[in-house]
Amino acid sequence: MTDTPTQDTQKLTLYNSLTRRKETFTPINPKRVTMYNCGPTVYSYAHIGNARAAVVADVLFRVLRHIYGEDAVEYARNITDVDDKIIAAATEQGVPISDITEKYARIYNENLAALNCLPPTHQPKATENIGGMIDIIQTLLKDDYAYASEGHVFFDVSKYDDYGKLSGNTLDALRGGDRVGEGEVARKKNAADFVLWKPELDGVGWDAPFGRGRPGWHIECSAMARDTLGETIDIHCGGVDLKFPHHENEIAQSNCAHGKPMANYWVHNEFLNMGSTKMSKSLGNVTLIDDLLKDWDGEVIRLALLKAHYRSELSWSEDLLKESKENLDSWYRVKDFFAYDLPDWSGDSSRGAFSYFMSDLQVPTLISSIGRGFSYAWKHREDHTPSEPMEYDKGLTGAQESSLTAYISITQCNLLGLLQKDPEEWFKGGASDDETSAFDAIASKRAEARKAKDWAAADAARDEAAAAGIALEDQPDGTTVWRKA
RNA sequence: GGCACCAUGGCGGAGUGGCCACGCACCGGAUUGCAAAUCCGAUUACCCCGGUUCGAUUCCGGGUGGUGCCUCCA
């Protein structure tokens, strides 16, 4: 019941922003596949757009692990824990920056864990990699790619011929953005030059041969990527907005310092919009992951984020969340039904799923296929019996086919990081023991009233359930069960 | 102004040179004491104009419309 895409499914292809084409992915070393994703600057709560970037990277991470083996993939997602905004927040609150950064880094990791994002292999912190940054800056200074000016160190973009290749910008075009007279601009040779090192601010600084100070934003990622993964990594991920200037500048620094490409594949996810408008602080429509998690299960949010292809804009809405919850409810229903009779299948456990991933991560199409699989299995569940071992070469009975279809969809969900809970927990989880017994009491109240044909009492029980935040479901056998509404 | 991306039914959102996405909502029916859950069924689409082609929503060109980036925002 699983559709098979028609395209070549043998090799993973990814859209490479650097070449603007889909390319076959070939790692430098299949025994050590490396990917880097720009993590958060931890001065506040992360929003749902941050979550999209992290979930996209997580799916890619899972797919790579599946292809090359769990131990063969190294994924680094940094924590930017020194930044002007952080320093400003710390100064304002009169606390060390670590008070701010440790709190929000912890919340970020908790938020992503709730979205079923696997922990990255490495989570480097900027403040723990200052040495690497100084090292790269010194190399750039020595080789004349950078220059010092009034306590700052700048990268000289005129020395790097390929500057602008990723974003499609040219130096001439960028010159138009020059805002003459604004602070750093006056110290720079070229308007597009960017800062590698800045003087100490509010007591935040590190000693360096070129003066005590703090790193510029871009150099942090270059250093952390190199020190955790190497001079050339396989895949660098991030949101499209980071293409310029952040990734452009990372490329310039790293290429010039190391004499080799920083990354072979650049994967950028598109934006998440609030309806048709951008999510932005100035519009006041920023949705925080932490807030969403108060109302929705992390898997609901994850599925909602995966409903659009990563290179398409995704319009976020309450309806999208509702829809995702309904999908998962019905999928968990199937998982619950087949839970004790999943086939012992020695074939490729990802049958079908993989081919979708292979062509630039066609996740929404896979989700559609998963939905059809569950739908098929559910509709044919009457045929289902705890059955004899399957003999695939002799053909399957209807019961076996539906059971196998459920199994395949569940496996595909596992690959996507969905349907990870026990169905019982999904439908009833989160309730305390007291609540559980209270809910059970409401359900049996309705069952008894229905048995006695006391419809008024039966309706009252249903109202009571709704008020308590649960839904009652009458079963064919006369019993009534409850679930979270 | 420069660069990049996009344009599919009420909404979300895939994909394809010729046949069905799919989900949600809506409508009809089954089931139900009435509902819920579940099942069956129906309806709605590919921005405009050219071109290539036997045939284009899908390829090419132009137009229109929308979005993002252009110095620290995923």
Image (cartoon, grey):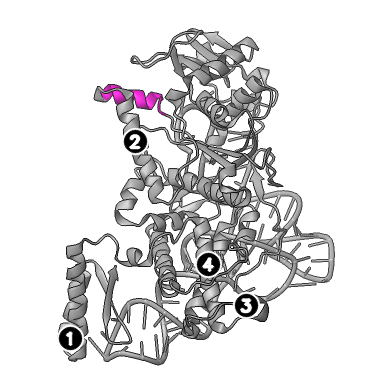
Q: Pinpoint the chain carrying mark 1.
A: A
Dot 2: few (<14), some (14–19), or many (≥20) neighbours within 10 Å?
many
- Measuring 46% from the left and 35% from the top, which residue is drawn there? A123
Q: Secondary structure at mark 3?
A: loop
Instruction: Name the subunit of mark 4.
Output: A
> Distance of mark 2 from mark 3, alpha carbons?
53 Å
Task: List the residue tagged with mark 2.
Answer: A104
Q: Main secondary structure of the magenta part?
A: helix
At label 2, which amino acid type do we have?
Tyr
Same chain assignment for discs 1 and 3: yes
Magenta-span inclusion, residue A90: yes
Image mark for residue A409 = 4
N-term mark: 1 or 3: 3
Q: CA distance from mark 4 to mark 3?
A: 20 Å
Instruction: Answer with left or right where residue A378 lies relative to residue A397.
Output: left
Residue A68 on image: x %, y % = 62, 48
Distance Cα–Cα, label 1 vs label 3 = 48 Å
The vertical placement of A394 against A59, above or below, is below
Nearer to us in this view, B51 or A131 = A131
Residues at marks 2 and 3 on the same chain? yes
Q: Amino acid at mark 1?
A: Ala
Packing grade of label 1 (10 A; few <14, some 14-19, many >=20) is: some
Chain assignment, label 2: A
Q: Which residues are magenta?
A: A81-92
Q: Which mark is residue A251?
A: none
Q: Is residue A160 above or below residue A43?
A: above
Q: Are marks 2 and 4 on the same chain?
A: yes
The answer to whether residue A146 of the structure is visible from this angle is: no
Identify the residue position indicated by label 3 in the image.
A391
